[in-house]
Image (tube, rainbow, N blue to C red):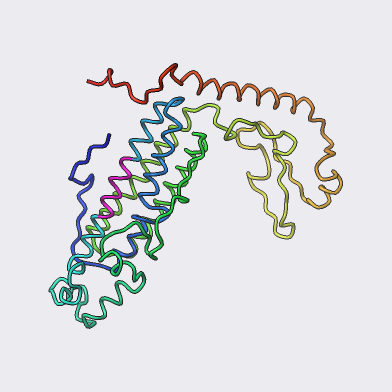
Amino acid sequence: MFHHSKDLQFNARVSKPDPAFANILLEQFGGENGELAAAMQYFTQAFGAKQPHPDKYDMLMDIATEEFSHLEIVGATIQMLLKGVNGELKNAADASEIMQVLDGKAAKENIIHAALNANPQFPIITGGGPTLRNSQGIPWCASYIHSNGDLTVDLRSNLASESRAKLVYEHLMKFTDDPYVKETLSFLMTREVAHYKMFEAALETIQPNFPPGVLQADPRFTQQYFNLSPLEGTRGPWNEGNMPGMQQEWEYIAQPDVYVAETQGLNNLEADMTTDLEHTAEANKLMSEMRSTEIKVSEPDGVAQWSNYSTKS
């Protein structure tokens, strides 16, 4: 049950109309890395987390709801940036605020082309109001959503999503000189950082959380680094020394073609990995039982009920 307050989470303000930037800002309204995509991603991920991880369900729903509030901030900002444009556009272009945007450098007809020619659907289909399309007029799509049903995978997806959204806001600030708009964008960008740290902390509370999923990595093929750029190959912590958190060392394959041929397509490796494979099989069994039990014991007997109303005051 959602409760909507008419007051925005952040006091979004605009000093003057800027329909061109309003169109660009649609990226965070109906774009791939926008607020709706984030809200729906965390909202859908929450369902699978409800039984085994009710605390993470609470977090995901809270952050999803905050993302909806950010969508409202972006929509409100877009609408304010279109002040004097949404009505009778050419008549409104005579108004003082629109002429201030022009600074006397263009005729009133030019503002229409300069502001809206990048996305003709913006004024034609929606009358200038924010819609669930990106700055190029492409409709929002559910394929933007990453929800894999494994919470460790989902949380890592969320870290990437927050990182991308942070960068979009960072880039957007380069295209406006309105101090109020920049203030709003800075707030939204900073909340992406805050959400990143929330997801990072949540991931750490799920142990073990690597490798993602249930099955362990095959120990025969985990540590090889294939040098597929032999003329310009470089060395670093990704191909020499200890593997991060794996208690193994990287095996640098300097000549992959020779190595693959000599091992008959990696089927005849020199090292005897029998013991390691047995340990992996046992780990797979234990992890399978743990993850399965984790969900089964959290599911209620008899009639399933999502909410326990008797505990609410």
Q: Nearer the viewer, residue 250 or 203?
A: 203
Residue 257 rendering spot, x and y as whole percentages: 81, 52
Residue 212 rendering spot, x and y as whole percentages: 57, 35
- Give the residue at x 74% y 57%: 230
| As drawn, 73 above or below 247 | below
Q: Say left or right for 301 vs 70.
A: right
Q: Say left or right for 225 vs 174.
A: right
Instruction: Classify residue 216 by image quadrant.
Output: top right
| As drawn, 220 above or below 182 | above
Magenta-tinted stretch: 65-75
- Give the residue at x 15% y 76%: 91
Q: Nearer the viewer, residue 157 or 313?
A: 313
Q: Main secondary structure of the magenta part?
A: helix
Q: Say left or right for 100 vs 182.
A: left
* Count of labels in the image: 0
Asked whether residue 14 is drawn in magenta, I would say no
Instruction: Classify residue 277 by image quadrant.
Output: top right
Please, which residue is most extreme toward the front here?
A: 303
- Give the residue at x 41% y 53%: 33
Residue 213 rendering spot, x and y as whole percentages: 58, 33
Q: Nearer the viewer, residue 156 or 237?
A: 156
